[in-house]
Amino acid sequence: MTPEPPEDWIDDVSGPRPDPEAVRQLRRPGRLTDPERRRLETELALNELLDSRRPPPLSSNFTARVLAEVAREPRAERSPEPWWRRLRWVPRLVAFAALAIVGVVIWNSGNATHRARLAQGAMELGTAATVPGIEAATLADFEVIRHMTATPRPEDDALILALAE
Amino acid sequence: MATTDDDADLMLQVREGDMDAFTRLVDRWKQPVAHFVYRLLPDADEAEDIAQGVFVQLWKSAGRYERQARFSTFLFTIARNLCLNEIRRRSRHPAESLDARLEPEGDNAPHQFPDPGQISADHASERAELVRKVDEAIADLPEKQRVALALCREGELSYEEIAVVLGTTVPATKSLIHRAREILKLRLKAYLASGAWEAST
């Protein structure tokens, strides 16, 4: 098994809440090189040295003393909410209103365009109906004619030239 | 003991002035807090007084507690600040004892160390010498390294939580702890090599 990088295993033994199982694994033969093993033992020795400084148990009336002290202090009150935090709903309302306005404008503009197109179509139809010689049957093909391109297509030009020759 | 949602819930109740919830929090956290304080100010009586002050401050600051904050980091930030205040006060007025400043009350029985009769005089002497050396070595560490090491060895907080209490990043926290340990290993080399702490405990 390849040893972990030194930083990782040192963290295991020198950081908070050292894991005894990780230490046991590290102590297995072949897990660490000799210098690493010496380092491990030194780290563990330092842990024991630091942890040997345990304070004596707290007084049995520690909690009672704290409560007596607290009883003389003003009651823990929730700090008043700052005015700007009470207005935290305003940005949301503004964003919602802006979205709604944009939506209405887009819908209105689409509607106006559609109505203008209908009006233009009706006007063109009216104009065409007043041209003498145009029959109702011709007007039935009005949409087809309207979609024809204004300029002749290249293949039409070629056909006209061929016929002229 | 890791912070649980229970602690945050209790703290929210304390914020509303619930004394029962406060009592439960004190009972649950008094030992870790006292150990942490003792690591920074190795005098049992003073450590207990300051630990008591930590919980009084917790009560007074409860109104500022927000659910987003982990209870353990909130509590140990208060503990850290009180300890640093005391350390700085001592450095300004080295002769003044905390006892002279704090009004004694309640149980004033001095703390007793283990009965010296149970261990030999030599071992007691070695132990006292070792404890003194360790205390000196820790006291000589830079302030941030000392606090980081105390929070780390107390075993209640993760690197992430220690970083929050120290107001720094996780890599910076790891670096502080690493440097503190390197300094201590150098200063206590003779004791680490001899295993003196094993013989004297």
Image (cartoon, coloured by chain):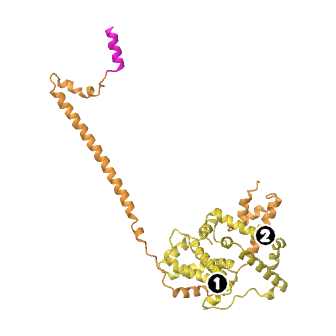
Q: Are the residues under badges 1 and 2 in a single subunit?
A: yes
Q: Residue at x 40, y 71 (%)?
A: A83
Give the residue type that dot 2 points to.
Answer: Leu
Q: Chain of mark 2?
A: B
Q: Which residues are magenta?
A: A152-165
Task: Tell which subunit mark 1 falls on.
Answer: B
| Residue shown at the point (65%, 91%) measured from the top left | B108
Color of chain A here? orange
First in residue order: circle 1 vs circle 2: 1
Please state which of residues B157 and B184 is positioned toward the viewer in this rendering: B184
Kindly identify which residue carries mark 2: B186
Residue closest to the eye, A17 or B195: B195
Q: Which chain is yellow?
A: B
Residue at (83, 60) in percent of width and height = A34
Residue B185 visible (yes or no)? yes
Q: Which image quarter: residue B38?
A: bottom right
**For residue B139, side relative to residue A147 (left or right):** right
